[in-house]
Image (tube, rainbow, N blue to C red):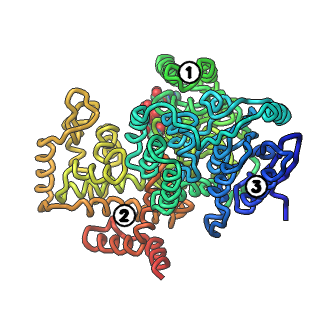
Amino acid sequence: MENLIDTQTRGPLGIIRMQRAPVNALGHALRGAISEAHRGFEADPAIRATVLTGNGKFFSAGADITEFDTGRKKPYLTDLIARLEEGTKPVVVIINGIAYGGGFELALGCDYIYLLPQARLAFPEINLGNIPGAGGTQKLPRLIGGPKALDIILTGTPIDASRALELGIAETIVSDEEEALARITQTVEAGLPRRPVRDLTVPGSADELETAAEPHLRRSRGAMAVLKGVEAVRMSYSAPIDEALAWERDTFHELNASSEARAQRHIFFAERSARKIADVPADTPLRPMESAGIIGAGTMGTGIAMCFANAGIPVRVIEQEQERLDHGLARIRQTYETMRDRGRISAEEAQARAGLVTGSVDLAAVANADIVVEAVFEAMDVKHEVFAKLDAVCKPGAILATNTSTLDIDKIAEATSRPRDVIGLHFFSPAHIMKLVEVVRARKTAKDVIATSMALGQRIGKIPVLVGVCDGFAGNRMFINFNREAQILIEEGALPWQVDKVFTDWGLAMGPLSVMDLAGLDVGYRIRQARGSQTPYPFTTADRLAESGRYGQKTGRGWYLYPEGARRGVPDPEVEKLIEDVSREKGIRRRPVTDEEILRRCLWQLVNTGYQIVEEGIAQRTGDLDVIFVNGYGWPRTRGGPMFYARETGLAQVAADVTRFHEEIGPHWKPSALLLEEAKAAGA
Ligand code: NAI
C-alpha cells in the first residue's frame, strides 16, 4: 500500500505530510494515518509540537467523494479533529496550497495556521447545497467573526493567502516550508502554548451577524443550505460548542440527503458532462484563438466583445456607421468604469480590458481575426450580406460564428464558400454576464471548429452547451412552449398574477408574464408578426397588449401596471377585462385553474419539448438542457433544472400527465417517444 503520509522529526517538531495523490482527499485510511502519527508524536517526549502539511499543490481538497457511495468508516473527520484538539501539544498547520471543505476544517481543528503564498482556502459545500460539517461553521467565526465567516461559508468563493491573513485566519505568510519550520521551531522553543480554535470566543456581537445575513437571505430564494448556514453561524455566538458541533454534523447529513443537494450535485456533474461530445474526441487539435472580431455594436455585440476582452483576447468591433460605433465603444468603456467604481475590478484592469477593444467601420479590419462573431440585425438578407463579405475578407481557417437566435444557420452558412467554418454561438443577454452559450453546430460545421468553440466558451468564462440547428435551438424552443402554455392557461381561466406567483413560489426569480414585461412585449410581437406564426394557439392577449402600446415596464404598462417607474408590477383590472374578452371571443368558458395545474402544464411542456429535442439529436443529453436552464434562464440550481425535476417527480407520472393533456387539450401535447420510453424503463 502507498504511504498516505510521510512523517519526520526535526528538533522539537514532529512533521506529518499528507501525500495521497492526487488531491490529499481525506479518505478514512488517510484520516487513520494522521491520527496514528499524531498519537506517536504526543507520546514522544522529544517532540513539543506537531506540524501538519501537504505535498505539491494540495494541502487537502477535502472529503473523499467516493466514500459517499461506499459508506463512511471510522475515524470520521470529526473524530480526527477531536483527537488533535484533545492533545497536550500544539498542532501547527502549514497550508501549502488548496485547502477546501474538509481540508480547511482540518486546519481549523489545529492551534495555529501558517500559509505559503500559494495557499487557497474555501468552503465549496454551498455549491452542492450544503454547509461545512466538521466544525467549519463554528470555528471560522471564532477566528474572524460571524459576518466574514458567513460570506466565506455562503459564497463558496476561494480566498488567497493575503486575504486569509488580512481576515485573521492565519498567523503569517512565509515564503516556503523551510522558513515556516524555522519560525515554528523558534516559537515552540520559546514555549508556544496550546490554543485550539474551538476554545476562542467569537469576536463582535450577534447583531452584526443579522445585518450581514440579510442580503444572503434575500438572494437565497429560500435555499435550505443558506438558511442553515446562517443558523449555524448564529449558534457560534450562543450555543456551547459541542452542542453546536453536533447540530452542524446532523444538519450536514440531513442537507446531503435533501432534494436540493441532489439537484445541485446533478447540475455540478451535468456541467462537466456537457463538455463531452460523442463524435468530437477530447484531444481534437484546436484552431488558434488569439484575436477576435465582432460585427455589430448593438446590445449583443458590445456584450460579446467584453467577454473576449475579459479573457484577455483583443477584439475589433465593426459597425456600419461611425456614430453607432462610437456609441457602442462608449458603452463598453462605461461598463468597465462602473465595474471599477463598484470595486469589482481594479483601475488598471478596467483600463487594460477597455484597451483590448478597438473599432472600425471597415469590415476588412477583421481580416486577420481567428474568430468573427456576427451580431447584426436578425434578418436573413442582412446576415447573408455580412457572411458573404466575411467570406471574401477573412483569413483561411478563421471561425465564422453567428449569434442569431432564430435563423437557420445552415442557410447562413450557404452565403460562404466555407460552411465548415461556420457555427452558431448563441449568447444570452446581457452577454457579458449570462453564463450560458449555446454552441450551435450546423450540418457542415467541422469538428475542430466545434471543439475550438467549446474551448473558447470555457476560456471566456462561460458554460458552453452543444446543440443543433432547429427553430429556437434548445433553450428558446423549450421556453417558448412553456410560455405558450401560460398563455393558454390564461385564456382558460387563470390570471397573469396567479401564473407568475406559482413560479416565483416554486423558485424562479420572475414569473413568465413579468419576464415578458421586462423584455418588452413589442419584441415578441414583432417576431410573431414577421413569422406569421401558424401555431394552433396564437399569443392573442399578448398581441393585443402590444398593439395597444402596452410594451411592459418601459411604457409603464404591460401585463401589469408599473406606476411611476416601479419595477414590480401591480395587477390591472383593464388587463383582466381584456383577457375575459379574448376568452369570450374564442368561445372558451373560463373556469378556476388550480396552481397545481399551472405548474404541471407549464413544466411538462418544457420537459416534453426537452425529450423531443434529445430524441431528434438536437441536444446530446437531458442533463445538457438542465445546464441550459440554470445558466441561461435563471432557473434555480436548487431545483436542478426542468429535466431533473421531472425525474424527481417520477417519469411515469410525467408521461401519464402528458398523455392525458394530449387527449384533453390538443396536438401540441403529443408525447415524445423518448419520454414514453424512459418512463417505461423507469417504471420497470
Ligand atoms: P441590436 O439592434 O442592438 O444591434 C445590431 C447592431 O448591428 C446595430 O448596431 C446595427 O447598426 C449593426 N449592424 C447591422 N448591420 C450591420 C452590418 N452590415 N455591419 C455592421 N454592423 C451592422 O441587436 P441585438 O439585440 O444586439 O441582436 C443582434 C443579434 O443577436 C441578432 O441576431 C439577435 O437575434 C441576436 N440575439 C439577441 C439577443 C437579445 O436578447 N437581444 C439574445 C441572443 C441573440
Give the residue at mark 3.
34
Residue topped by disc 1? 361
Q: Are marks 2 and 1 in contact (CB under 8 Å)?
A: no
Circle number at residue 604: 2
Residue 66 in view in this figure: yes
Q: Residues within 10 Å of mark 1 (few under 14, many from 20)?
A: some
Q: CA distance from mark 2 to mark 3?
A: 51 Å
Circle 1 SS class: loop
Q: Secondary structure at mark 2?
A: helix
Say which label, 2 or 1, has the lower sequence index.
1
**Residue 232 relative to residue 95: left or right:** left
Element carrying mark 3: helix
Place residue 295 in its image quadrant: top right
Gap in angstroms between the C-alphas marked 2 and 1: 47 Å
Look at 71% across and 55% down and name the residue there.
25
Q: Is residue 150 above or below residue 655?
A: above
Q: Amino acid at mark 1?
A: Val
- Tag 2: amino acid: Trp
